[in-house]
Image (cartoon, grey):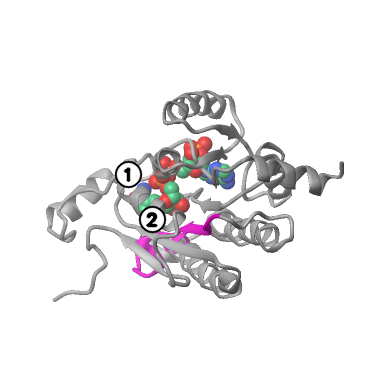
Amino acid sequence: MNENSQIARLAAQHQKPVALVTGAMRGIGRACAIALARSGFDLALNDLESEETSRLAAELAAEIAADGAESILVPGDVSNLENHAKLLQSVLERWGRLDCLLNNAGIPAQRRGDLLDVTAESFDRCMAVNTRAVFFLSQAVARYMVSANASSAMHRSIINITSSNARAVSIARGEYCVSKAASSMTTRLFAARLAAHGIGVYEVRPGIIATDMTKPAKSQYDAIIGAHLVPAERWGYPEDVASTIVCMAEGRLRYTVGQAVTVDGGLTMPRF
Ligand code: NAP
């Protein structure tokens, strides 16, 4: 039996949708993996390869299994494009199908500070993880999804987690803003290319969400919320972002193409 017919056989046997979540061990990615499992997805969990990732993945797998979902760990740095084929192959060898890619893995600026001091190293790192990896992993998955091998009976989606900073200017982390604005364009490009295939491509822009990423700037964000700049008057939680992701992955944004949903309690809503 050749590789394609083996994948087709597995896909025919596996009637549950499958999602690949990058950066799934912490914060927003972890909450999204759990919410997708509860909504009926099996999960391929990606994160950087380490002993800590293996430990966290075992915990997450147990939590997901309690919701009746299967999971596999597919470790690897998404900014290394050579890992992408391996990630996709691992998912297809396990279940023969991939219905949802959640591009969640992301990094902050190396240091917050004056725009005039941004280093090329921090800029390139932000672009490598937040932009280049998102573009090329989307491309690899899109090639599979439009191929004859792909199973298309269920809703299929590619979802990119950008940031309020895809639009809102924060001059203390300019390179992060640039990297997320570029991924916003990546979303619309792939949305236009894949719409005729029935593949939904969406963007989610979280605001101030309580995760390890925002911990170092907690007092600054507490001050923003304390100053009533967030109409919802609270921090966002990873589960807030996950609820939007599930709507998108389940195909509940019908006849929408390339939409960005802002999950920020109103932080970036224009008002006067
Ligand atoms: P987080 O708590 O730092 O979690 C990010 C996860 O991604 C970590 O498990 C991290 O692994 C992993 N990761 C980082 N680089 C990776 C790579 N190259 N390959 C594979 N995995 C990688 O961050 P978060 O707050 O949940 O953020 C998730 C996404 O939301 C990011 O794209 C972020 O930019 C975006 N976002 C967050 C906020 C917020 O307020 N938290 C707001 C707007 C947008 P390690 O821990 O091992 O590094």
Task: Tell me which corner region of the image, top left, top right, bottom left or bottom right, holds residue 253.
Answer: bottom left
- Residues packed near mark 2 inside 10 Å, few (<14), some (14 to 19) or many (20 plus): few
Image position of 24 (left or right of 242): right
- Residue 141 image point, x, y percent: 65, 56
Q: Earlier in the sequence, mark 1 or mark 2?
A: 1
Residue 194 is situated, as x and y percent measured from the top left of the image, at 59, 70
Q: Secondary structure at mark 1?
A: helix
162 to 87, vertically: above or below: below
Tell me, yes or no, whether the highlighted magenta stretch contains residue 31.
no
Where on the picture, by quarter, is residue 6?
A: top right
Query: Residue 161: within the magenta?
Result: yes
- 53 above or below 100? above
Q: Which residues are magenta?
A: 154-176
> Residue at horizontal 52%, vertical 53%?
103
Tag 2 residue: 247
Q: Quadrant of the C terminus?
A: bottom left
Say whether residue 21 is visible.
Answer: no
**Which amino acid type corresponds to the residue marked 1 in the rendered image?**
Glu
- Marks 1 and 2 sit apart, C-alpha to C-alpha, by 13 Å
Q: Is residue 9 left or right of residue 161?
A: right
Which secondary structure, mark 2?
A: helix
Closer-to-camera residue (129/188): 188
Camera-side residue of 68 and 221? 68
Residue 18 image label: none
Locate residue 130, reporting x and y percent: 53, 56
